[in-house]
Amino acid sequence: MQLLKSILGGGGNNVSAADAQSLINGDNTPFILDVRQPEEYRAGHIAGSRLIPLDQLGQQMNQLPQNRTILCVCASGSRSSFAARQLERAGYTVANLSGGMMAWQRAGLPVKKGSK
């Protein structure tokens, strides 16, 4: 938990692709929320992520775990930043992948293609 606090600080902070990968590989694995559109998700996403497009987040927020950090992901970090703020206001502990999937791919991290 200390690693998480040192990386996230007050919650809702941006994390780099490398820090996100460390969180994913750590003991307190975050729930990875991809807020892009289905066609973007199918083109390449982080393995184990869950797709809830940003425009559906309000209606589907109750499907998210309250007891885990939610790592928000989009293409560039803009939509996911908005989602992170929305979730933080609703009481969730959140982080935003700075630079989104573009930064993830630039860092050479694994991308899964398809709908699952």
Image (cartoon, rainbow, N blue to C red):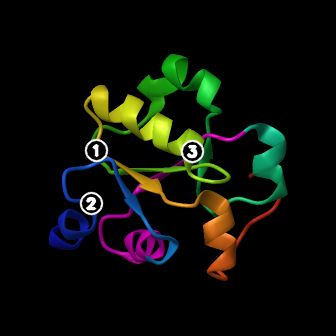
- Estimate the x, y position of residue 74 in percent, counting from the top left: 62, 49
Magenta segment includes 97: no
Q: Residue at x 25, y 31 (%)?
A: 91
Horizontal relation, residue 37 to residue 92: left or right: right
Q: Residue at x 68, y 41 (%)?
A: 36
Front residue of 27 and 92? 92
Which amino acid, mark 1?
Thr
* Earlier residue among tags 1 and 2: 2
Horizontal relation, residue 80 to residue 42: left or right: left
Judge depth for marks 1 and 2 and give the one in front. 2
Judge depth for marks 3 and 2 and give the one in front. 3
Q: Please say if the residues under marks 1 and 3 sit with CB atoms less than 8 Å apart.
A: no
Label 1, on which residue?
93
Label 3, on which residue?
78
Query: Are there few (<14), some (14-19), or many (20+) residues within 10 Å of tag 1?
Result: many
Which amino acid, mark 3?
Ser
- Quadrant occupied by the N terminus: bottom left
Q: Is residue 26 above or below residue 31?
A: below
Q: Secondary structure at mark 2?
A: helix
Q: Quadrant of residue 46?
A: bottom right
Label 3 and label 2: CA atoms lie apart by 18 Å
- Estimate the x, y position of residue 55 in percent, counting from the top left: 63, 23
Q: Please say if the residues under marks 1 and 2 sit with CB atoms less than 8 Å apart.
A: yes
Residue 115 in view, yes or no: no
Range of residues picked out in magenta:
19-36
Which amino acid, mark 2?
Leu
Q: Residue at x 68, y 52 (%)?
A: 75
Label 2, on which residue?
8
Q: Residue at x 47, y 78 (%)?
A: 18
Label 1 and label 3: CA atoms lie apart by 18 Å
Q: Quadrant of residue 5?
A: bottom left
